[in-house]
Amino acid sequence: MQIKTVVLVLASCAFAACGSHHRHDEAENLNIRPSYLGTISSTSYDGVSDDLLTAGLGKTGLAAAAPAYADASNPTAAELRRNAIYANYRAVLDIAANSGYGTLYGPNVDAKGVAGTGEGKVAGTEYIAYADDGSGSQNVTLMVQVPAGFDVKNPCIVTGTSSGSRGIYGAIGSAGEWGLKNNCAVAYNDKGSGTGLYAFDDDSVNLQNGARSSRAAAGKNANFAPALSDAERAAFAAAYPGRVAFKHAHSQQNPEQDWGKMTLRSVAFAYYVLNEKYGALARDNKSHLVTFMPKNTITIASSISNGAGSALLAAEQDSEGLISGVAASEPQIQPKTASGYTVRQGAAAVTGQGKPLFDYSTFAALYQPCIASTSAAPGRCTALVAKGLLSGGDLAAQQADAKARLHAYGWLADSDVLQAAHAGTNVLVAVTYAYAYGKFAVTDKICGLSFAPTDASGAPVAFSAAQKAISFATQNGIIGSVVYEDAVGGAKAYNLGVSPSTGLADQSLDAFLCLRSLATGVDPVTGAALTGTLAAQSARVKAGMTEVAATGNLHGKPAIIVHGRSDTLIPVNFASRSYVGLNAAAEGSASKLRYIEVTNANHFDSFANALPANIVPLHVYLFRALDAMLANLRSSAALPPSQVVRTVTRADNSTAITAANVPAFVTSPASSDTITVSGTTVAVPD
């Protein structure tokens, strides 16, 4: 430790004057700990036995079977961290054979894109703390990873806000990997949504390090505990055994409204850590001087999906100049308005521009289960036809009509091959965000829907002690199956539920018609305005939707958005294309936003191996956007112009994806590939 301390002091002296050189009559710029930070823990990794990027597994271990626990019923914090990194890395990337893993991307591929023979482990130090208001009810996990190769003469920070509802390691394989490879500090946060499993049966919670604890013992250190009295907990546990609560849905705080703020707080945490680690000592020989600050440090807000939306929101809300630029992939971003700008594809204005997430996810939750239906179980399609919400004399015609309705709502035909695969995902999204936006308690059972593990018959069951013990490493932030409490015959997993109004095994259609009504404020079958309890619930949900809307004003910051044209979860018409239009209306000619749309790319790279003829990895384009943004900020290199990148699909999954499948951005795209912004009109080529 003494040698390490000397090295750090020397490094700081090389960057800025050491404390002894400061005039004693000058005020010192001291490194002040942000008031919202709780206890900071830190662990250093040698890059051999353990590391920041792969938890010691390396490129080979990440591609192998999940590592085992010495005692799965009592995992150590280190084992939970290792398996969380393993699971989150694989959730973001496709690491199947011939996917490009290990050749185009992966730990062994260096910052210049050159694949090496090593394992790609990264030595360095990891710092973790909660951000909270003192109540213990927020407890947003922040983490800063500082690689051993951090360059004090060319300092940089990259944000890695978690995608989806994931925990603190949710961006480890995306923005995290790029940042570490480029010797940047990485500022992560879980957005107040990840790894907060609460079990009613034993009143247990996750701690910050993933270990399980009783709610009473955890106190303010719980990642999440619902606001329930002991009596309320006991009553709910008895009436609804096996049900669970989780942070994103049930915190009653609508965490999304703070995703931009928490991303900014993660950057402030990174500055604090870097200045403590490398800053010269102040005259009191205890405090450190501020060495790194926005005027000498590049900070790129980045990540994918929800994390990418958080990056854009952070840039919009950045009043302190913390963020230098943005590189975001497939952002879940919701324009505050769908008007005031126009998005065109080819010769026609697109349909559905600027729709909010809860609007389009509840629409998808009606029709995608029909597209995923089989001749043996056509119940959802049949029930939609009976209610006048679908047409067609047989299953094939009904599924074609479901796709047509999705097209008319704003999905592109490019998404057709993926519609069935997204049915379950959009159900989870719709239910989770109904609770989140309305700030409902788990006991509210909105639209008769709750969460629990289920058995083969669809009946709710309890998590085992072993499942709870390793939940930090296995859960993606949305926990258990969606259960329809009001199904005929009793509570069932939604996909096996029989609706009271139809008497059919229609995948609990009644519940999803209810969710749809919360989004629109009207009965989706009759068109009548909601009244009573449903009207009040809809008003709450709509208020929450308003709280998360983006302004589109990036305040002149350079930004690159990349998005796959085949994205079926966050379709381009609803999100990125419309955000470009909103930005044009907000910033006009001052805008430095570039938009790159990638054909044959979708939201989940893991689908590439299942549908090899249709999907290429979007991941490589995030890294290219980050490369371009760093070059712009560091050496004033021109940003790539807005463009459509036309990728090349494979014949089958026995063919390896190579650079030829994923061509690079071009500096002068052909007119047939150029995306233009003229006034407030965004024009995207076919």
Image (cartoon, rainbow, N blue to C red):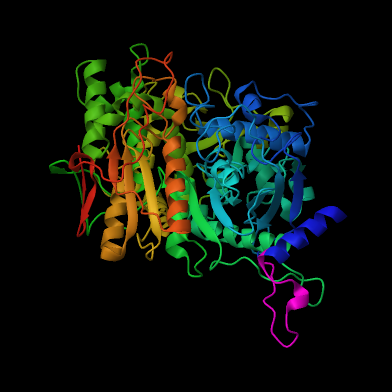
Left or right, 321 with reference to 82:
left
Q: Residue furthest bottom?
A: 25
- State whether residue 399 is above or below residue 530: above
Q: Can residue 208 be seen in this view?
A: no
Q: Which of 31 and 212 is in front in this view?
A: 31
Q: Please give the range of residues in magenta.
A: 15-34
From the viewer's perspective, is residue 646 above or below residue 316? above
Image quarter hosting the C terminus: top left
The question of residue 622 being in magenta is answered with: no
Q: Residue at x 20, y 21 (%)?
A: 392
Give the answer, above or below, for where 377 lies relative to 606.
above
Q: For this rendering, which residue is in front, 668 or 456? A: 668
Is 134 in front, or is 597? Answer: 597
Query: What percent of the width, then of the height, locates residue 369?
Result: 36, 26
* Residue lying farthest to the top in this orientation: 376
Which corner quadrant of the image does residue 476 belong to?
Answer: top right
**Is 27 covered by the magenta stretch?**
yes
Prevalent SS, magenta region = loop
Residue 402 point in image, percent of width and height: 26, 28
Question: Measured from the top left, where is residue 195 in percent x and y?
Answer: 62, 42
> Who is closer to the viewer here, 293 or 509?
293
Residue reaching furthest right? Answer: 2
Instruction: Determine whether, in the image, residue 556 is placed left or right of residue 61.
Output: left
Image spot of residue 611 (x, y percent): 39, 20
Is 622 placed left or right of 62 in the picture? left
Q: Which residue is drawn at 72% across and 55% down?
A: 220
Which residue lies at the image location 77% right of the left edge and 28% below the top edge? 73
Residue 662 quadrant: top left
Query: Which residue corresponds to the image point at 63% horizontal and 49% vertical from the top-left?
Result: 226
